[in-house]
Image (spheres, rainbow, N blue to C red):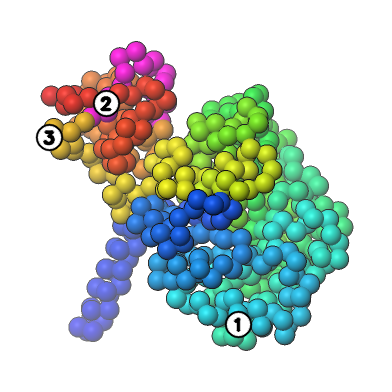
């Protein structure tokens, strides 16, 4: 082999090593701005880049201040075309003017990823508007190509109200009339342009006390699909497979699916809402979509996902829940613990190192009256959030003594030390307490 070939091989191996050691963790968030106490976009972009693992955002307009703020950040941005512009965008001349005004001035410095045409347009039941959706998408794509912009994809987000049948998942079907007239042509366009089908699954809206574990990814008996003989253990997989089945019925099982919105509010006028439920859903969801496990009908895949939403927005109209979907307060304080979203001093998506608390500092330990089952939940929670739990596994340095309380002490302190050492990082639903005495001595 020549010296030049060896150099090329070495470079390729180095790149492969870089890729293999860089986390494939990815999560997006919807960045809404209906608040009078939100920080400027430049501060938001810097916060996301330096303090979180969030590597993509979706906004509900083409706010130029936001697009400028994310320039050079490396964070992917999805912009949205308002529903009212859809008829105009079906005209190529108008679409070209829109691209020239709203995309070209910011691209490629700002990594505009998708253009979302409308938002849950089928839900409007405005048939003339719905009829112009796919022509508008095609026209907008053509305008991008004519402007020399080929790395921005055009899609449109949909609620699961587009389905007439969603249970069992294998029988998922699009609403009659819209299946062939709207979704067939739309999926054909998405296939041609290699763009994803964007859906907004919200298990939250299917919550009931009886279904709580199924909705929140907790252990449960599951729901059986007699046609596939598959038992579904969470509502998210069921929803996604219902969408997939509807797409497959039309012959478009190969089109990728992206989650435009999903999340859980911390406060509402219903028992479903609490910080604990929101934390549980989002933590498990983020792990699930990044795990590569996929769903029963779509195995071995990851799903690009945009959580809803970034901030609690105090000016949003409607029920209490509408103002309480945020991961963060306007001052960037987490609304609840976000171990698999915050960087906590680690590289993006990397595993937490084994913590070492500086001398004279604090340690997080279980309260003396904490129940064993609560401590086991703490272990499960922390070990699913990128903390390295190998030391408490058999053969690990902290495996002995082999009991729940000892293992919980290790992981709770690991989490506290690597998540910023805030007092709330040691709360664990009131089962943790801070001490100045090193528990390992």
Contact, mark 2 vs mark 1 (Cβ under 8 Å): no
In terms of secondary structure, where does tag 2 sit? Answer: strand
Residue 277 x, y percent position in the rendering: 54, 32
Quadrant position of residue 417: top left
Q: Residues within 10 Å of mark 3 (few under 14, many from 20)?
A: few
Give the labeled residue for mark 2: 434
Q: Is residue 21 left or right of residue 374?
A: left
Which residue is found at the position 46% from the left and 39% from the top?
A: 335
Q: Which mark is residue 229?
A: none
Q: Which mark is residue 359?
A: 3
Which residue is found at the position 42% from the left and 25% from the top?
A: 429
Quadrant location of the N terminus in the rendered image: bottom left
Q: Which residues are magenta?
A: 363-380
What is the C-alpha distance between the residues marked 2 and 3? 14 Å
Taking the image as drawn, is residue 270 in sight?
A: yes
Q: Is residue 177 left or right of residue 43?
A: right
Q: Is residue 114 above or below residue 315?
A: below
Is residue 367 magenta-colored?
yes
Q: Residues within 10 Å of mark 1 (few under 14, many from 20)?
A: some
Which residue is found at the position 34% from the left and 57% from the top?
A: 50
Which residue is found at the position 79% from the left and 44% from the top?
A: 165
Q: Is residue 29 above or below residue 108?
A: above
- In the orientation shown, which residue stands out farthest toward the top? 369
């Amino acid at each position: 082999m020549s010296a030049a070939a060896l150099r090329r091989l070495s470079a390729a191996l180095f790149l492969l090593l870089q890729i293999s050691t860089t986390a494939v963790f990815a999560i997006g968030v919807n960045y809404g701005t209906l608040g009078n106490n939100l920080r400027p976009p430049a501060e938001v972009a810097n916060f996301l880049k330096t303090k979180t693992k969030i590597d993509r955002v979706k906004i509900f307009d083409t706010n130029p201040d936001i697009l400028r703020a994310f320039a050079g950040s490396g964070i992917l941005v999805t912009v949205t075309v308002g529903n009212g512009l859809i008829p105009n965008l079906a005209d190529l001349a108008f679409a070209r003017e829109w691209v020239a005004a709203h995309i070209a001035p910011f691209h490629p410095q700002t990594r505009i990823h998708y253009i979302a045409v409308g938002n849950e347009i089928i839900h409007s039941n405005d048939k003339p508007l719905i009829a112009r959706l796919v022509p508008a998408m095609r026209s907008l794509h053509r305008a991008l190509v004519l402007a020399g912009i080929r790395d921005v994809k055009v899609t449109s987000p949909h609620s699961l109200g587009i389905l007439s049948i969603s249970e069992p998942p294998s029988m998922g079907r699009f609403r009659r009339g819209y299946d062939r007239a709207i979704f067939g042509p739309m999926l054909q366009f998405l296939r041609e342009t290699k763009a994803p089908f964007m859906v907004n699954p919200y298990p939250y809206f299917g919550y009931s006390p009886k279904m709580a574990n199924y909705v929140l990814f907790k252990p449960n008996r599951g729901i059986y699909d007699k046609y596939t003989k598959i038992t579904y253990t969470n509502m998210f997989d069921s929803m996604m497979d219902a969408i997939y089945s509807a797409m497959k019925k039309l012959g478009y099982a190969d089109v990728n699916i992206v989650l435009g919105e999903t999340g859980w509010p911390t406060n509402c006028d219903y028992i479903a809402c609490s910080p604990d439920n929101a934390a549980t859903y989002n933590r498990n969801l983020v792990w699930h979509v990044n795990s590569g496990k996929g769903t029963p009908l779509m195995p071995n895949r990851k799903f690009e996902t945009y959580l809803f939403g970034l901030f609690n927005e105090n000016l949003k109209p409607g029920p209490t829940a509408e103002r309480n979907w945020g991961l963060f307060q306007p001052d960037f304080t987490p609304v609840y613990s976000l171990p698999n979203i915050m960087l906590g001093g680690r590289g993006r998506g990397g595993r937490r190192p084994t913590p070492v608390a500086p001398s004279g500092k604090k340690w997080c330990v279980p309260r003396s009256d904490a129940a064993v089952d609560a401590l086991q939940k703490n272990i499960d929670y922390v070990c699913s959030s990128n903390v390295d739990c190998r030391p408490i596994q058999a053969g690990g340095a902290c495996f002995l003594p082999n009991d729940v309380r000892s293992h919980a002490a290790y992981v709770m302190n690991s989490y506290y030390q690597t998540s910023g050492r805030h007092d709330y990082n040691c709360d664990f639903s009131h089962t943790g307490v801070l001490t100045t005495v090193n528990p390992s001595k």
